[in-house]
Amino acid sequence: MKKYLLIILLSLSLPAQAITLDELYKRYDPQGESAFDAKRGEQFWHKKHTAEDGSIRQCTTCHGDDLSKPGEHIKTKKVIDPLARSANAKRFTKMKKIKKWFKRNCKWTVGRECTNQEKGDLIKYLTQF
């Protein structure tokens, strides 16, 4: 029993492996049938959505137009680290965080969860910077 506990504890101390972009795309398109497109991602990024309260939201509302600079959440005023990988090398490297933020941000901005196609297109666009 002690042996298994030690193994579990040691494995928890290992750093989480960063995911590659190819692995990330495969998560959103396991059959490899979709072609993710940065242009569609850019259009989605700038698209205006009407929230339930009637306010207009888009991704840039909080993240800003310059992805190499920090953004600010419009409601909470919390600082959002830059999305550009050139300014923040940790962006798009942890699947757990990617899933968490897509779920939360899509629901808040778009009013629903984003489709896998939308997520792949957004990643293709955002990882250019």
Image (spheres, rainbow, N blue to C red):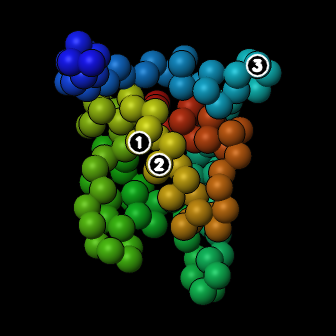
At x 30%, y 56%, the residue is 80
Give yes or no for contact between labels 2 and 1 (Cβ–Cβ under 8 Å).
yes
Q: Residues within 10 Å of mark 2 (few under 14, many from 20)?
A: few
> In the picture provided, is 101 more to the left or to the right than 25?
left
Q: Is residue 124 above or below residue 110?
A: above
> In the picture provided, is 79 more to the left or to the right than 102?
left
Q: Position of residue 1 (x, y in %)?
A: 27, 18
Q: Which mark is residue 97?
A: 1
Where residue 48 sits, quadrant-wise, is bottom right
Q: Quadrant of the C terminus?
A: top left
Residue type (three-letter) at the residue carrying disc 1: Lys
Q: Which residue is mark 2?
A: 100
Q: Choose between 115 and 35: the one closer to the eye.
A: 115
Residue type (three-letter) at the residue carrying disc 3: Gln
Q: Residues within 10 Å of mark 3 (few under 14, many from 20)?
A: few
Q: What secondary structure is found at the residue carrying circle 1?
A: helix
Give whichever of discs 3 and 1 has the lower sequence position: 3
Q: Position of residue 20 (x, y in %)?
A: 45, 18
At x 70%, y 46%, the residue is 115
Q: Which residue is mark 3?
A: 31
Residue type (three-letter) at the residue carrying disc 2: Lys
Q: CA distance from mark 2 to mark 3?
A: 23 Å
Q: Is residue 75 above or below residue 71?
A: below
